[in-house]
Image (spheres, rainbow, N blue to C red):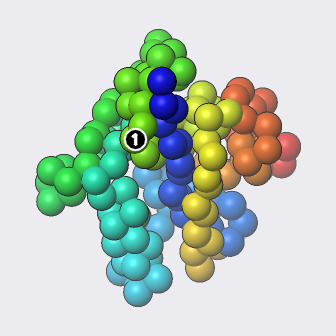
Amino acid sequence: MQQPVVRVVCAIGQSGQIGLNGGLPWEGNRSPEFLADVARFFDITRGHVLLAGPKTIASIPEFARSDRELVVVRSSMNPEDTLMRFAGRVVFIGGGPPVWDAYARFVSHWDVTRLPYDGPADRWFNPGWLTEGGEIAGNRRDR
């Protein structure tokens, strides 16, 4: 059976910030770099599968729902079994640290954009996802 191609496309701040109060730290920023990043995300994921937690899937705007397959993942789901449902397809993993902790070991391509944001955050990109995969201890910037 053919394996899915598993990818992540995400953005980080200058210090690796990825989340603040359940959203993106730069949420609502209308500067060209931020708008281009959002447009690029929707362009890259078009026609493919997006697996993410319920909050991330709920945040996908109506215009983007018809041209990609959106699948809510839950912590009770086995990542390998979930991915095998999409054999031969490109699957993007969204949703941040809890989802990336579970799916990192399957990711063959990380597409990370560094945005000109250097403000507060409560979630940080863990570079261990790139090399270790699977469960990464913690998600604090100082580890």
> Residue at horizontal 42%, vertical 31%?
87
Image side of residue 18 versus residue 59, left or right? right
Question: Residue 56: which quarter of the image?
Answer: top left
Residue at the farthest front position:
1
Q: Nearer the viewer, residue 77 or 97?
A: 77
Residue at the farthest bottom position:
32
- Placement of the C terminus among the 4 image quadrants: top right
Q: Nearer the viewer, residue 65 or 60?
A: 65
How far from the left and from the top, in percent, is residue 26?
47, 67
How far from the left and from the top, in percent, is residue 42?
33, 63
Residue under label 1: 89
Image side of residue 70 versus residue 111, left or right? left
Query: Does the image show residue 73?
Result: no
> Residue at horizontal 41%, vertical 86%?
32
How far from the left and from the top, in percent, is residue 118?
64, 73
Whether 31 is drawn above or below 140: the answer is below
Query: Does the image show residue 51?
Result: yes
Image side of residue 17 versus residue 94, left or right? right
**Badge 1 amino acid:** Arg
> Residue at horizontal 70%, vertical 29%?
134
